Amino acid sequence: MAQTIVTQMELRAITIGMVPEEFAGSMGVVGLPVWMWVDTPSEQTYGPMTRSASLGGVTVTATATVSKVLWEMGDGGVVTCTTSGTPFTQGHGGQSSPDCGYTYARQGTYTVRATSYWSVDWTSNTGVSGSIPLQFGQSRIVQIGEIQVVRG
């Protein structure tokens, strides 16, 4: 019954929030901070979510939570964030993210993959309990360039 509840929860990957953004002409710069976060988190993308179901006198309650988001940055770097991250605003300027960020050392086009690690912990009124681990991933492209200074 716990697996049925998990299916009904319709859990899914996060929507990636990231600066630099993913649109034509948007580019980060080598050595400057990249910010990552869960964009518009919901019960289905970040939790927590609790659902119950009963059948034949047995009631199962399951709670799904994200324990971490693992960011594979495309250049071999990996960042583990245990919060949903802080969305970037213009007021942050060139500051580093307080909780989920990265800095590229080389220019290039990188595929960033964010994998959310879920734990669905369930209990029943019969004393039986367990945990179901789940992972969901989402990818996007980021462009990183260099700034060249010409002195004359």
Image (cartoon, grey):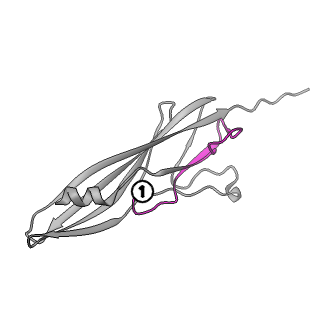
Figure quadrant of residue 4:
bottom left
60 and 72: which one is in front?
Answer: 60
Residue 150 percent coordinates (x, y): 84, 27
40 and 58: which one is in front?
Answer: 58
Q: Residue at x 47, y 57 (%)?
A: 84
Q: Which residues are magenta?
A: 17-45
How many C-alpha atoms fall within 10 Å of the one at disc 1: few (<14), some, or many (≥20)? many
Residue denoted by label 1: 45
Amino acid at pointer 1: Thr
Quarter of the figure with the C terminus: top right
Taking the image as shown, residue 130 lies to the left or right of residue 88, namely left
Q: Secondary structure at mark 1?
A: loop
Residue 40 percent coordinates (x, y): 52, 60
Taking the image as shown, residue 73 lies to the left or right of residue 92, namely left
Q: Residue at x 51, y 38 (%)?
A: 112
Q: Among all residues in the image, which is located at the extreme right?
A: 152
Q: Is residue 22 above or below residue 86?
A: above
